[in-house]
Amino acid sequence: MTIRRGAHMLAALTTALLLVSCSGGDQGARRVTEGRDYQWDKKAGALDASAFMNVAVPEDATQIKGAIQLNPQEDVYLLTFVTSEKTAEGIAQDLRSEEPLRVRKGDSAEGERFGHLGLPEPQTLKGARWAGVCPPCVNDHRRKKVQWIDVYVDTLEGDRARVYLQAF
């Protein structure tokens, strides 16, 4: 009976140690959402996201933020900034989407991507316009590493707009 009890305690201790060692030391950066395991690249920012998407941040841009979400299959690059409405629309056009910017109805927030940057998810903003594009599908050789880009333009006051870009 003592041997059996010792075996149970050893098994419990081994399980506890295994859980602790697999949990990783960086709990703040790792999240599990909807069965997906991802983490944020703490060293990456707007410059990295801009370079991956081959999107130049306008000179007049303010509130520039970016991040890279590391995923097992493909990383997701986020870039956001505030610029003039005209410039925001020009950025969307430069992506060469087959459809113009339009308001999408019924979209809900998927995950916490832009929330990581302290912003609401763009698809939840009333009146935000969206376009999506597959750069390889439209022969955009400038973005041959990019499989998909979502762009949202949220009109603000004073001829300003926040651009949200998400790419993988």
Image (tube, grey):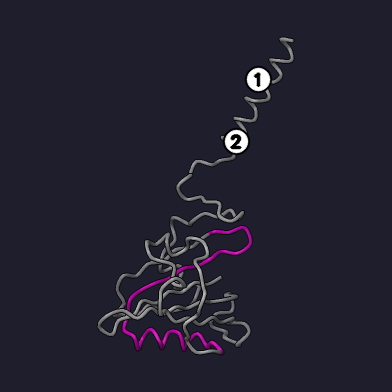
Q: In this view of the protein, which residue sits in the foreground, 159 or 44?
A: 159
- Is 64 on the left-hand or right-hand side of 32? left
User: Element under label 2?
Assistant: helix
Task: Give the residue at mark 2.
Answer: 19
Which element type, helix, strand or loop, lies under badge 1?
A: helix
Rounded to the nearest whole Å, what is the CA distance between mark 1 and mark 2? 15 Å
Q: Residue at x 31, y 84 (%)?
A: 84
Quadrant location of the N terminus in the rendered image: top right
Q: Which residue is mark 1?
A: 9
Give the numbered dot on residue 62. none
Residue 144 is situated, as x and y percent measured from the top left of the image, at: 59, 79
Q: Residue furthest left?
A: 158
Mark 1 or mark 2: which comes first in sequence? 1
Q: Is residue 81 covered in magenta?
A: yes
In the figure, 120 relative to 151: above or below? Answer: above
Where does the image place residue 101, in percent across and percent down from the top left?
Answer: 47, 86
Give the extent of the magenta segment. Answer: 70-98
Q: Amino acid at mark 2?
A: Leu
Amino acid type of the residue that numbered disc 1 sits on in the rendered structure: Met
